[in-house]
C-alpha cells in the first residue's frame, strides 16, 4: 500500500521538449474554458491563438441575436462568480466592473407538477417561510443543511481546484479525510433525505443535478453543494446574458494580444510522434508548442486526433462512456411581456421519476415533461425591442438515441411544450411569437459539435470523475491540454473556469514558466493582482 501524499504535495511536471519555453499556444475553441485559459496564458506572456469554428465566441455560452432579440444559447444561471472574480483579479481586472451583473431575488420559482410552488430566495427567514407552506417540519432544517454544506464546500474546494493526474491523487490525506463528509455511496436525493422529508422540498435542493445533466437519484451526493452555492453565493444575471461574460472575456483577451480566428474549424491536430506541434484548418497550418483543446472532448478526440495515437481514450472506449442528457430548446421573441412570470421558473413533472427514467434509461420522450423557462426581460429589458420580450425554454431530453427521430418528433414536442408552458402561467403564447428558433439534440451535434448532443458532456458518475475523467494534462499525448466541461472538475461555468486555472498551472509548470502566481489549490486568498509577464 503506498503512503498517503500530503495535501499540498507539489504538482509533478513533464519535462518540456529541449527544455524550451513555449512561445506559442493554440487553443481550439472559444467556449468559456478556452477563453479563461487564453486570458491566463496570455497574462503569463505566451503567444496565444484561439481558433473557433463558429463565427462568434462563447461556444454553448454564446448569444443568439436576431430581429432585435438577444438570447443566451446555453447557460442562463451565473453561479459562484468567485471563481471568475479570482481569475480576473489574477490578470489585473475587476469582473464586476468589466461585466455588470445583478443578483436575483427570488432566484427562481419552482412549480411542482404534483402540486404547490416555491419562490426560492437567498433570504433564509423568507425561504424558511416558503418551505413551511409545503412542509413546516422541513423548514427547521434549512439552517442545518446550509451549515453542513458550507463545511462540505470548504473541505472539497481544494479537490476541485487541483489536477487529478492519476489514482495516487485519490490517496491524498485531504481526500481520504473527506469520505465521511462526501458520502460517495449516496445519491444527492438520499443525502438530502437527511434534511427534508417532503419530496418537493428535497427536489428544491436536488434538481440542480440537472445542471450536470443528471438525475438526483443517480448523481453523487457531493453535488448537494450545487444548491448550497446558489443560496450562499447567489444566482446572478449578467446584463446581456451569460453570453456577455464570454464576449467580455474575449474582448479583454484581444486587448491582451490574443489572436482570434473565428469561423475557422480545426480539422486536425498535428503531431511529431506523440507530441502535438500545431493544428490544421482549411486556411492552413498553425504551429504551436502546446495545444489546448476546449472543443467538446468526445467529439474533438474522435475527429481531430488519430485513434492510433490514443492509448486510454480510444474511439472504442469513448463509445462505451456514459453521456449526460441533452436539451430541447425554444428561443421565442414575444410581442408584449409576461410580467407575472419570474426571471427563472422550473417546472418539475408530476411523475418526476418517470420523466427522468424516460431521459436516462428508456431514451423516450415524456408527455408531461419537466421544463425550465427564462423570462429575462423582467430584469434586463435590453434583450428585446421596446414592448417585446424573450422567452428561453429548455426541456431536458435524452441525448441522441435511435429511439427518438427528431426530424419527426420535433414539431409535436414543440407543440406539447407550448401547452406545458400554460402550467406556469404562459398562456396565449402562439399568437404572440414574433421570432422563433428551435434547437434539438440533432442540432447540438451537427451545428454545435456536441458529441451525441450530450449538452453537459460525459456524465458525472464517480467512474467518470477526478482521475477517471479525461485529464487536464491529457494523459494520452504530449503537449495536449484540456479545458472545459469534458475534463476535471466537470461541467457548469464555475468549474469550467476552474478547469482553465488548473490547466494553465500545469502547462506553465511543464514549460518552466512558474505558475505560482495562479495560486495554490484550495487557498482562501489568491496572490493577485499580478503584473503581466
Ligand atoms: C442548454 C444549456 C444550458 C446550460 N445552462 C448552464 C447554466 O445555467 N449554468 C452553468 O453554469 N452551466 C450551464 N451549462 C453548461 C456549461 O456551462 C456550458 O455548456 C459551457 O458553455 C461549456 O463550456 P466549455 O468551455 O466546456 O465549452 P463550449 O461552450 O462547448 O465551447 C467549445 C467551443 O469549441 C468550439 N469547437 C468545437 N470543435 C471545434 C473545432 N474543430 N475547431 C474549432 N473550434 C471548435 C465550439 O464551437 C465551441 O465554441 C449549460 C449548457 C447548455 C448546453
Image (cartoon, rainbow, N blue to C red):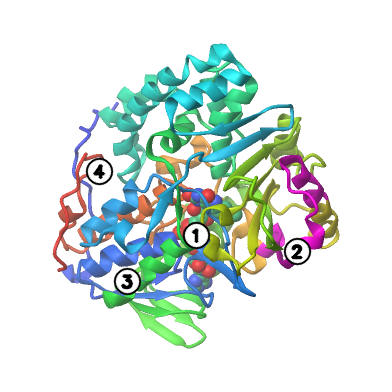
Q: Nearer the viewer, residue 17 or 450?
A: 450
Mark nearer the viewer, 2 or 3: 2
Q: Nearer the viewer, mark 1 or mark 3?
A: 1
Which residue is label 3 attached to? 253
Q: Disc 2 vs disc 4: Cβ atoms closer than 8 Å?
A: no
**What element does badge 4 sit on?**
loop
Q: Earlier in the sequence, mark 1 or mark 4?
A: 1
Q: Mark 1, mark 4: which one is toward the viewer?
A: 1
Q: Residue furthest front?
A: 387
Q: Nearer the viewer, mark 2 or mark 1?
A: 2
Residue 150 at what x, y percent from top left? 35, 28
Residue 227: % across, % down: 48, 34
SS for callout 3: helix
Report the front residue among 517 and 239.
Answer: 239
Upstream in the sequence, badge 2 or badge 1? 1
Mark 3 neighbour density, 10 Å: few (under 14) some (14–19) many (20 or more): many
The magenta-colored residue range is: 416-443
Which dot marks residue 241?
Answer: 1
Whole-angstrom CA distance, mark 2 to mark 3, is 37 Å
Q: Residue at x 42, y 77 (%)?
A: 279
Disc 2 secondary structure class: strand
Q: Is residue 499 above or below residue 53?
A: above
321 sits left or right of 427 in the view: left
- Position above or below: 94 against 114: below
Q: Is residue 306 visible?
A: no
Instruction: Give x and y (percent) for residue 469.
Output: 45, 46
Residue under numbered circle 4: 521
Towards the viewer: 201 or 20: 201
Residue at the spot x=20%, y=45% of the render? 520
Amino acid at each position: 500500500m503506498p503512503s498517503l501524499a500530503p495535501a499540498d504535495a507539489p504538482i509533478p511536471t513533464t519535462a518540456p521538449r529541449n527544455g524550451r519555453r513555449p512561445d506559442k499556444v493554440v487553443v481550439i475553441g472559444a467556449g468559456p474554458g478556452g477563453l479563461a485559459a487564453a486570458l491566463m496564458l496570455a497574462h503569463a506572456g505566451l503567444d496565444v491563438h484561439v481558433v473557433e469554428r463558429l463565427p462568434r465566441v462563447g461556444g454553448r455560452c454564446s448569444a443568439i441575436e436576431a430581429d432585435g432579440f438577444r438570447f443566451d444559447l446555453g447557460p442562463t444561471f451565473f453561479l459562484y462568480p468567485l471563481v471568475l472574480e479570482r481569475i480576473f483579479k489574477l490578470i489585473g481586472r475587476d469582473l464586476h466592473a468589466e461585466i455588470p451583473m445583478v443578483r436575483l431575488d427570488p432566484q427562481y420559482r419552482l412549480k411542482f407538477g404534483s402540486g404547490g410552488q416555491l419562490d426560492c430566495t437567498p433570504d433564509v427567514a423568507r425561504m424558511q417561510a416558503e418551505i413551511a407552506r409545503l412542509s413546516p417540519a422541513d423548514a427547521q432544517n434549512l439552517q442545518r443543511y446550509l451549515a453542513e454544506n458550507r463545511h462540505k464546500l470548504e473541505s472539497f474546494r481544494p479537490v476541485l481546484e487541483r489536477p487529478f493526474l492519476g489514482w495516487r491523487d485519490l490517496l491524498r490525506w485531504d481526500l481520504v479525510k473527506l469520505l465521511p463528509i462526501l458520502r460517495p455511496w449516496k445519491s444527492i436525493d438520499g443525502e438530502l433525505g437527511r434534511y427534508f422529508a417532503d419530496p418537493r422540498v428535497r427536489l428544491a435542493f436536488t434538481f440542480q443535478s440537472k445542471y450536470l445533466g443528471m438525475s438526483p437519484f443517480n448523481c453523487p451526493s457531493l453535488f448537494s453543494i450545487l444548491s448550497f452555492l446558489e443560496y450562499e453565493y447567489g444566482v446572478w444575471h449578467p446584463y446581456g446574458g451569460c453570453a456577455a461574460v464570454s464576449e467580455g472575456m474575449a474582448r479583454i483577451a484581444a486587448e491582451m494580444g490574443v489572436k482570434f480566428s473565428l469561423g475557422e474549424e480545426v480539422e486536425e491536430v498535428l503531431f511529431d510522434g506523440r507530441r502535438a506541434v500545431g493544428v490544421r484548418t482549411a486556411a492552413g497550418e498553425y504551429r504551436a508548442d502546446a495545444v489546448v483543446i476546449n472543443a467538446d472532448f468526445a467529439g474533438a478526440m474522435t475527429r481531430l486526433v488519430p485513434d492510433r495515437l490514443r492509448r486510454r481514450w480510444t474511439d472504442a472506449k469513448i463509445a462505451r462512456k456514459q453521456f449526460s442528457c441533452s436539451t430541447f430548446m425554444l428561443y421565442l421573441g414575444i410581442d408584449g411581456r409576461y410580467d407575472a412570470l419570474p426571471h427563472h421558473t422550473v417546472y418539475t413533472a408530476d411523475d418526476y421519476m418517470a420523466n427522468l427514467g424516460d431521459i436516462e434509461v428508456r431514451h423516450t420522450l415524456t408527455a408531461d415533461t419537466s421544463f425550465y423557462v427564462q423570462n429575462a426581460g423582467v430584469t434586463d429589458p435590453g434583450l428585446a425591442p421596446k414592448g417585446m420580450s424573450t422567452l428561453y425554454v429548455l426541456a431536458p431530453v435524452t441525448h441522441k438515441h435511435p429511439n427518438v427521430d427528431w426530424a419527426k418528433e420535433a414539431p409535436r414536442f414543440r407543440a406539447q411544450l407550448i401547452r406545458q408552458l400554460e402550467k406556469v402561467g404562459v398562456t396565449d403564447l402562439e399568437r404572440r411569437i414574433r421570432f422563433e428558433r428551435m434547437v434539438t439534440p440533432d442540432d447540438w451535434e451537427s451545428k454545435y459539435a456536441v458529441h451525441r448532443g450530450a449538452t453537459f458532456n460525459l456524465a458525472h458518475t464517480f467512474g467518470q470523475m477526478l482521475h477517471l475523467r479525461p485529464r487536464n494534462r491529457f494523459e494520452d499525448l504530449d503537449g495536449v491540454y484540456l479545458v472545459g466541461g469534458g475534463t476535471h472538475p466537470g461541467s457548469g461555468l464555475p468549474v469550467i473556469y476552474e478547469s482553465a486555472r488548473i490547466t494553465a498551472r500545469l502547462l506553465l509548470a511543464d514549460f518552466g514558466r512558474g505558475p505560482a502566481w495562479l495560486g495554490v489549490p484550495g487557498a482562501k486568498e489568491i496572490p493577485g493582482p499580478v503584473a503581466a509577464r
